Image: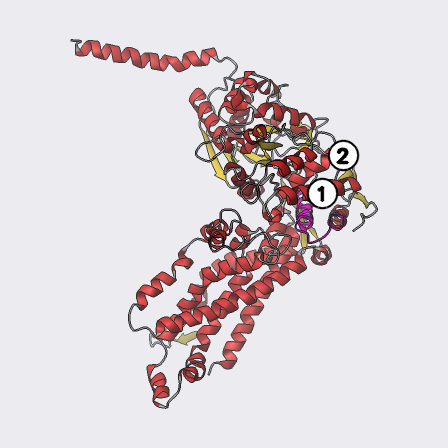
Amino acid sequence: MPSIRQISATLAAVASLAWIAPLHALAADPQFADVGKQSTLTMLVPATPWLPAFTKLVEQYEAQTGNVVKLDVNPFGGVLDKARNDVRSGGGAYGALFLDTQWTIEMYEGGFVTPFNDVDASFVMPKEVLSYGDSGYWNAQKRWRTASGGKLMGFTVLGNVQVWYYRADVFKAAGLAPPKTWQDVLDACAKIAKPPATYGAVLRAERGNGIRYDWQQWMVQRGGSVAKDPENGDFSVTVNSPANKASLDQFIELGKKCGPPNPGSIGQGDVIQLMSTGKALQAQLVLAAWSNFENPKKSAVVGKLDVVPLPIPAGGVPGGVIGNWNYTIAKGASPEQKKAAIAFAHWFLTYDAQYAYAKAGGIPNRADVLASDLARDPTYRWMRAYAETMKAATQELGYVEGPQVEQILGLRLNQAVIGEMSSGKALNLAAQEIRAVFAKNDRKTGLGPPLPE
Amino acid sequence: MRLRDPHGGGVVSATFKYWSLAPAVLVLAALTVLPTLALLRMSVSTITFAGGRELWAFTPARNFASLWSDPGLAATILNTLLFVVVAVAIEMVAGLALALLVGGLRRGKGLIRTILIVPILVPPVAIGNMFKLMYNYDFGLFNQMLGAVGLPAVSWLGSTSLALWSIVLVDVWHWVPFVFLILFAAVEALPVDVVEAAHVDGANRRQMLLRIKLPLLKPAIVVALLFRAILAFKAFDEVYLLTGGGPGTSSELVSLHLYRVFFEQNQLGYGALLSVLTIVVVLSLLGAGRRFLMARTP
């Protein structure tokens, strides 16, 4: 029978091994950045579907570095309100602010976030990190987000883009190939949908940012735009072009033929609900929703879905609109908080951190992770569609009037969907209103010929 | 100057009285007057940000011009008027009916009152989410009930002709208890001798209601009506959570529009102007009600 001394010695040995094990793990992972001891970092973050993945990664950061990160989690709109309150009052509450891509311009132009190189002159963005349409750069002279002559203001912490979800099991049973064109989607709807038990495809068309963002994916596929060349100062309104009308007409047709009878009130939550309950067989959705469908506690279709890049119209080109979250450093933060924010950025952008992020359910921002062994793992079967979509994805409404333009489009497009006015009239009205917004800000603007109403 | 204390406590200095009030006046000024003045200033300005600082420009004409070029404002005002008139009318009638009904009971008044006020206690966010689930086209309780009796599903929140009325229904559910509470207290306080005298004089139920009870309840009714009209004019939570003002502009109310302009579009000056106009309308409602009350109350 072992003596108390022997038992104590064994326990001590086990304890030392347990202590050594993490060190060994660290040594085996040299690609995680050693960021040293930092002050507590407070981040303002949104309550989004990818937050659990980010939280897991933060916990890993804390365990590895001993540094502390506090997450102030808020609903989508609440993040902007809190960020504005903080920065406009001089700041200090947050070290890092997570900004939706549409909010970055206001914050960059307002001078409310600190360029990374003002905190750490040696900070360089790893070349493997995707640019996401340069949403992390700001060229103050040009008033445009571009790496060309722009300062590094942030990086993408969640690079959302829309993909096409479909029920792989149903498609296989029906002998259908994954859809490549909108016509494929319509054909599949006609073949597999049995409304009201199941809907062929669901689009988000509720008033506001939802329909604006979703329709713009269709818009860019036909080479459409809202303004002619805003990057170079030409804000002539082009939203009421024949190409945009064609894409809006097709958007409406698909919503009516394939979706529920209330398309004008379908929001992102509704689309996710319809897909996860198995009621919808296809949907246009952000990739960040993927984790919902693979969670057995939230989904009745685990393992049954697959994604492809958004289908395109006949004669169209692949394209998408990026809707990313940007990690920025608040200007009013203390020097210690800023330093801690840069340290976290160093760590977060490493290959291994991004790899761990993907494994936790996040969307990695590095090309090498998207091309890693994970891409061949069926669990991460979304990676190929994502990488493919990102090749042609762009930023839209990248000017300070963006939120107003978004509101105008969000209303007029919705009115076209619900049949309150024709697509031509909706786009003509939107064009007039957008031109007025640009003119108010002394932009060089104009209006093309109206569409037939 | 020295004044005689009306309570017989001797002579007090008027200066002392004014100085005693000074802290309260200062607090009031700091919390009410200054923000109102700031709002007024903002309403005639355009505010932008650069270099981490606010830049103010005096642009009253531009802000007022925005009122005419605002595409959704006319529909918003019309919706708000409809919402206020219909929701408050239903709430007043239902609240009064409940107050008279419960007031006429001999037993169980306390229990019924407690049950009836539950909706006021539920947070508006919870109410919004609860009804959003119940109104859901595919999974909602209302459509399941319709389906159970063989009726087709209704797009409660997705139809332009129904969305506003679906919100009115939620508002009625939420606020009838409030009207009930005010009027129930008034019913309980009706002078027994007057009511009994009317009985003795042979007044029937209709006469009792129209000639005796309603005139006596009028001050309480006006107070409840004013409160509800003002609160209904400012309604935000329900419409924000249920429809977001859509589809189209069919359920957009003034408060939601103001929120969009101020927070989503970041137009601080024009948003402030809309706020000032909202305050003016609410104060006008208050003034009209007060005048009505003063004129008709003996």
**Which residue corresponds to the image point at 60% horizontal and 56% vertical from the top-left?**
B251
Tell me, for residue A223, which label it has, or none. 2
Q: Which residue is at the front of the view, A281 or B109? A: A281
Residue neighbourhood size for the residue with mark 1, other residues' Cα within 10 Å, grouped as few (<14), some (14–19), many (≥20): many
For disc 1, the marked residue is: A248
Q: Which residue is at the front of the view, A221 or A157? A: A221
Circle 2: element type: loop
Mark 1 vs mark 2: which is more N-terminal?
A: 2
Q: Nearer the viewer, mark 1 or mark 2?
A: 1
* Residue B2 sits above or below residue A25 on the image: below
Q: Which residue is at the front of the view, A97 or B78? A: B78
Spatial CA distance of label 1 from label 2 is: 13 Å
Q: Quadrant of residue B189?
A: bottom left
Q: Amino acid at mark 2?
A: Gly
Question: What chain does mark 2 sit on?
Answer: A
Q: Quadrant of residue B199?
A: bottom left
Q: Is residue A416 magenta?
A: yes
